[in-house]
Amino acid sequence: MSEIPYDGGPEDASGIDPGEPVKELAGFEYDPSDVFWNVVRRKIQRRSTVSQVASFSWNIPKLILAEAWSALIHIIGSQSGKKEKGL
């Protein structure tokens, strides 16, 4: 095979010392603005609204068919009851 010794690679990264944090990057840390949070909230609300509308539009045809079937069964049942009483 290869004459190069295997050193463990990235899978064996538990022994790596990350060292000191970069001091220049510490100055870049800041909290997100209220505008950013409002944008994120609006996007989440928009997605949940679309999800609810999609769910509603998926379930409403089933409900309409179930109600129509129920009405049809009720009409057939009431007409058969009238025929039995008339004979």
Image (spheres, helix red, strand yellow):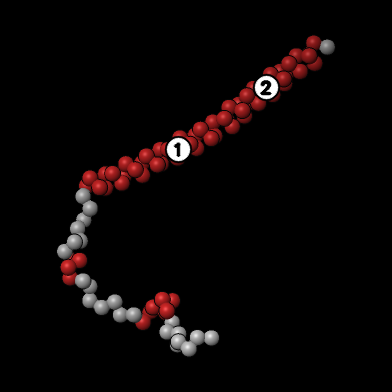
Q: Position of residue 7 (x, y in %)?
A: 42, 84
Residue annotated with mark 1: 52
Q: Mark 1 or mark 2: name the one nearer the start of the chain.
A: 1
The residue to which callout 2 is attached is: 72
Q: Quadrant of the C terminus?
A: top right
Quick one: label 2, few (<14), some, or many (20+) residues within 10 Å?
Answer: few
Q: Is residue 79 left or right of residue 34?
A: right
Q: Quick check: 73 left or right of 84?
A: left
The residue shown at (62%, 29%) is 66
At which x and y percent is residue 19? 25, 78
**Relative height, residue 53 to residue 19 (above, below):** above
> Horizontal and vertical percent for residue 49?
40, 38
The amino acid on which the numbered mark 2 sits, given as a three-letter code, is Leu
Tell which of 22 and 41 is nearer to you: 22
Residue beneath the point at 21% across and 50% down: 33
Vertical relation: 3 (above or below) 59: below
Question: Which amino acid is tagged 1?
Answer: Gln
Q: Nearer the viewer, residue 42 or 4?
A: 4
SS class, disc 2: helix
Please tell me how crowded label 1 is: few (under 14), some (14-19), or many (20+) other residues with Cα within 10 Å. few
Q: Residue 44: image x %, image y %?
A: 36, 44
Q: Which mark is residue 73?
A: none
Q: Is residue 85 left or right of residue 52?
A: right
Cα distance between the residues tagged 1 and 2: 30 Å
Q: Nearer the viewer, residue 5 or 54?
A: 5
Q: On the rendered structure, is 43 left or right of 27?
A: right
Instruction: Identify the residue at the far top of this view.
Output: 86
Residue at horizontal 48%, vertical 36%? 54
